[in-house]
Amino acid sequence: MTYIAKTQGAFENVSRRGLLKGVVASSSFVFATRLMQGTARAYETGAAAMHGGVVSDPHVFIAIDNSGIVSIVTHRSEMGTGIRTSLPMVVADELEADWDKVRIVQAPGDEIRYGNQDTDGSRSTRHFIQPMRACGATMRLMLEMAAAAQWKVPLDQVEAKNNQVVHKASGKKLGYGELAAAASALPTPAIESVKLKDPKDFRYIGKGDVKITDLHDITVGKARYGQDVMVPGMKYAVVARPPVVGGKVAKYDASATLKVPGVLKVVEIDPPPAGPPLYHPVGGIAVIAENTWAAIKGREALKIDWNDGPNGTFDSNSHYATLAAASKEPGKTYRNLGDVESALKSATKVITAEYYVPHLAHATMEPLAATASFANGKCEVWAPTQSPQAAHDYVVKRLGLKDEDVKVNVTLVGGGFGRKSKCDFVVEAAVLSKAMSAPVKVVWTRDDDLQHDYYHASGFERLDAGLDADNKVTAWRHRAHSESFMTTFADGVDRMDLFPLGFGASDTPFNVPNLRIESGKAEAHTRIGWFRSVYNVQHAFAIQSFVAELAHAAGKDPKDYLLELIGPARIVDVASQTTDKFWNYGEPVSEFPIDTGRLRNVIEVAAKEADWGRKLPPGHGLGIAGHRSFVSYVASVVEVAVDSKGKITIPRVDTAIDCGFAVNPERIRAQCEGAAVMGTSLALFGEVTFKNGRVQQTTLDDFKLARATDAPLDTRVHIIQHGLDAHPTGVGEPGLAPFAPALMNAIFAATGKRIRRLPIGDQLKA
Amino acid sequence: MVKFKVNNDARAFDGDPSMPLLWYLRDELQLTGTKFGCGTGACGACTVHVDGNPVRSCSVAMSALDGVAVVTIEGLDRDGNHPVQKAWRELSVPQCGFCQAGQILSAAALLASNKKPSDDQIREAMDGNICRCGCYHRIIAAVRLTANGV
């Protein structure tokens, strides 16, 4: 349910919503304040304000059997960030568990029991490092209490160590297995009595040498994703969906389909109710068969006439023209400092540039799939979902069931990037299982996946800067135009407000006296979602490219000019300049401020590690970009080589990341390596286009992704070292946004050509 | 009736001859280690070995399989300890992991025909396997590591 939980009634089940707000959210607040009293290290995060809040009770998350096997529940979804390993690793460390004895249990969707489960927004570590530490430490205390009771000695004479409790004086030992029953029977001790570990005693946290828990299974083909679910008696379904959002089936003929061997049934899925798309299935005609292939063949044999509805004229070329025209007029101001119009008028030089990022598809390697088994008024679901509670609530509502009669099991997620936060595909499975009176797996084919996404919004950015006689920026005006993701949840939204602008626009950290962030009109005619890094993709692309353009105009080094524009190390007070509440990734600015010292540092580190300014062969160039997102700081230096035909290779990228205390450095490194590849994809190839309301891309040959021969040849990740006093911040997303502008800046350095519209496509072709 | 072997087990198939091997493996044999990624041979997630050659199982019809030996990720090594699999674990290659079976089978096929590939040869050989998480850096390092002995 992600970002919208607090702002919109996307959850329609009012009673459940009320319950969550009334009980869990308040207890998580109590948790946070108590922990703060209990230890000096505790601090507020945005976690308590999330749907479901925070739970840290070891009775919920930890079970120890009498052989000492420690089962740890993970309530976040694994889609490649390593979180299914990292948070249990935190619990195990505080618990003094032996990792070899730890087994990981994936929680079903149940936010009352587990706290918030929306695995997106790069929040899992930053919201759950504290509760999971507390959870492990509480269980450790309970084991020590049980041992002390059994030995009839004071608590301070015993110590938990490596899956056993030791009586310090005598050296007597009791294994966790021997203490499990007694410890688990204890009530959860008050949080004030729980003592977190001294970081110097960490066994796993911050080390990076715990392998991801599914590593072996992945390499031998045993890891189970949503596409791999098998339920006895299961049938297979594919769905022909309306090619235009808001479209409906006018009429259809399934007679040829029903003759395809293996086809069992054809079912019409009702169109969604009037109003915003939400997470409803888009409707269409489902073909249910004995196997996936028969279902696919059966779908090919369907004859369907569609009513396209009002979005049937949507066209990417005219969309671009509409946004470009809008950018000529003032947008709505959301942040203002000084008087930008006067400053532009009195500037020695005014520089203007426009940038565009098209719609993008998530294109997870695992196309969507979900399995549902509906019987006797109950429905069990298995799905690769980033948001199992939302999936649960949508199935409850669609089938008219009780909360307790729907269970959503979470499989491994074969790539998510935000797409699998939306549960339209899960609801399809539930509807079809009910219609078939049998378990049904809905398989999305790749064309389904590309054609029925919740797309990354397009972005048209117009930037105007005024420079004085010393080439110092005196005015900065940014007009951003992107369809808001709120269009998915509410009618009448025609532009971004401070929520989407918070992804890299309203939080612009530059040291200029006159600054204005405007949002122009941008209507959505498709479903808009959030894609890894969200609006930071277009905002960082435009801003960081523009800074390099200004540097060029000023005749200065791009890195030096970027640092000059950021200005001295300080905390930037954006909140006092915004027209409404500043959105800081949901975090309190007191704990997660905009710290230009940290931003400067990642830029300096990336530049130093990349040997910025080094002599390069002809046709090569270096580019730099530095950007704060998800309350982390990332800078990339990209080296590019452009040959005489305009072919691009990327010999090297250096990425510096400051994500506070590095809980699992090995996975932080992996995320930054991967971000450079995803950045390559969207910079070189990524584009979804619409014609007559239809997405024109159907395969991975026309929605191209970076391959081994496209990817950077050498990726070096530099993690800024911090103690736990620097709160862990986001990791999954922030690596992406700086890559594309750093690459464009490198291309400019190499060729003198400035790319302002993504993807590069043929723009460099000789 | 088509007769062939899958992971050394003799199999026979007399269903729809146009069914791609992918769906036979996944839906009929429940060998779900072979992944569906695109259905058009563009992504390599469904890579298996047919008579030792890396093949996109989504693009091979069952009718073409008479007399062949198919090896899937489940059958690459009985204990899951093929040198490529070990190198993959050594370097913690996967992120989400979905494409990795296909990657491993492409890498194993490369190394069976070229024991010491150059980095460019590795990239060329792995070019048919897309990883959306972007693990290429480690994929190439793991193939290199395998070639140099794990």
Image (tube, coloured by chain):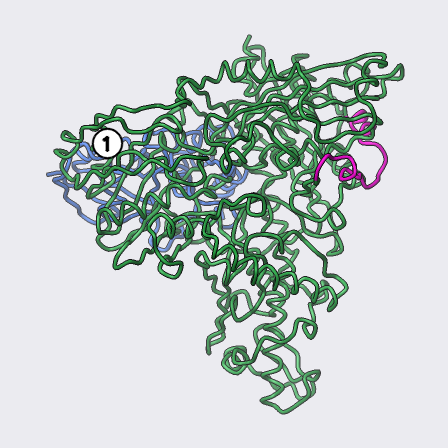
Can residue A415 be seen in this snapshot?
Answer: yes
Q: Residue at image x 48%, y 61%?
A: A104
Badge 1: residue crowd in 10 Å (few <14, some 14–19, many ≥20):
many
Question: For this rendering, which residue is in front, A369 or A557?
Answer: A369
- Identify the residue at horizontal 32%, vertical 55% (top origin): A379
Quarter residue A153 falls in: bottom right
Residue extending furthest toward the left: B1
Q: Is residue B51 visible?
A: no
**Residue with the most extreme bottom position:** A152
Percent from the top left, x then y, of residue A325? 60, 13
Q: Position of residue A91 (x, y in %)?
A: 58, 64
Under tag 1, what secondary structure? Answer: helix
The reply, left or right, for residue A697 in relation to residue A37 is left
Which residues are drawn in magenta? A559-580
Tally the marks: 1
Q: Nearer the viewer, residue A564 or A429?
A: A429
Chain coloured blue: B
Which chain appears green? Answer: A
Q: Is A230 left or right of B106, judged from the image as shown?
A: left
The chain identifier of the residue carrying mark 1 reads A
The percent position of residue A694, horizontal first and vertical second, equals 39, 22
Q: Residue at x 35, y 60 (%)?
A: A405
Quadrant assignment for the C terminus of chain A: top right
Residue A590 placement (x, y as % from top left):
76, 49
Q: Which residue is mark 1?
A: A299
Q: Quadrant of residue A128?
A: bottom right
The front one of A546 and A313 is A313
Q: Is residue A759 left or right of residue A448?
A: right
Report if residue A489 lies within the magenta region: no
Q: Amino acid at mark 1?
A: Arg
In the rendered image, the vertical position of residue A247 relative to residue A294, given as above or below: above
